Amino acid sequence: MLTDRSASQAARSGGSAVRWSELDRQALDDLLPHAVVVLPIGATEQHGHHLATGTDALLIDHVVSRAAQQCHSRVVIAPTLAFGASDHHLTFGGTLSLSVETLTAVLIDLARSVAESGGRRLVIANGHGGNVGACFNAAAAGAARFGLAIAHLNYWDFLPRDLGAEIPGHAGAFETSLVLATRAELVASPTDRGLDVGHPIDGAGAVVHSAGWWRDIDGYTDEPGSASAEAGAAWLTAVVNALASCLDRLAVTLR
């Protein structure tokens, strides 16, 4: 049962979603046992010459906020973690990175904090490819150690494949289109390079990590010059709708 105070604070936040940072401790005490906590995580790293370093954090915060507002279930949005595992971008500059080990520990500590605060269900919503392994490991460890039910997801996985985006890429047409649709002023006239960037996993049947490949492609993939705000808006809507449905399902199935 929610107290009048927590219900009032939730109503002021709009919809079924509320932000952790906008509630007091009593409101959270009342809400957390009944809610799904969503922790968005992005990165602060170089995105070529045409996108801002905060692209990943910006996009995951936008996607989670919109999806949570569409949910029928109670959702508490934790503050977006703006730093991720980005060591592979350090040589380009403009990057603030946590090591994979540190990021994993941070996520485990945040899961512990959610449990100690009374939460029972946590979703780690990821917006950066370099975070995938840390999210997986932290979710497994947090569930085992703290009695939480934890899910982890990557927002780009919710884009239907028939929409034709090359995902997720890095600062290519997909991300550039999404930023054009959300914060166009942060995009600086991307152009196509005519460069066959390829990918080190093509045809190999294995996941390959290669500093040389990142250097060869100047730190960003595919052709950002083909991006458009119209495509970005359509892709965002598809992702948001699918993620909202997923969060509603998780609200029922996470135990």
Image: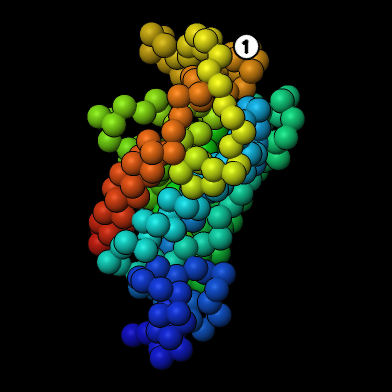
Question: Which residue shows up at 46% across the image and 43% down it?
Answer: 181
Q: Give the number of callouts.
A: 1
| Quarter location, residue 254 | bottom left
Observer-nearest of 154 and 238: 238
Left-right relation of 225 to 47: left
Q: Is residue 118 above or below residue 241?
A: below
Residue most extreme to the bottom = 4
Which quadrant of the rendered structure holds the C terminus?
A: bottom left
Q: Is residue 220 visible?
A: yes
Left-right relation of 43 to 143: right
Left-right relation of 127 to 98: left
Image coloring type? rainbow
Asked which secondary structure carries label 1, the reply is helix
Please state the horizontal and vertical placement of residue 158, each as a whole percent of the image: 33, 41
Left-right relation of 118 to 251: right
Question: Which residue shows up at 58% across the image and 52% down it?
Answer: 81
Observer-nearest of 235 and 255: 235
Question: Which residue shows up at 63% across the image and 39% down it?
Answer: 52
| Quarter location, residue 1 | bottom left
Observer-nearest of 229 and 162: 229
Q: Is residue 230 above or below residue 77?
A: above
Please state the horizontal and vertical placement of residue 226, each as a whole percent of the image: 45, 24
Please state the horizontal and vertical placement of residue 48, each as a whole percent of the image: 63, 27
Q: Tell me the residue that label 1 is attached to.
A: 216
Please state which amino acid type lies under the numbered disc 1. Answer: Asp
Q: Is residue 200 visible?
A: no
Please state the horizontal and vertical placement of residue 8, each as a whole percent of the image: 43, 86
Question: Which residue shows up at 55% across the image and 33% down it?
Answer: 130
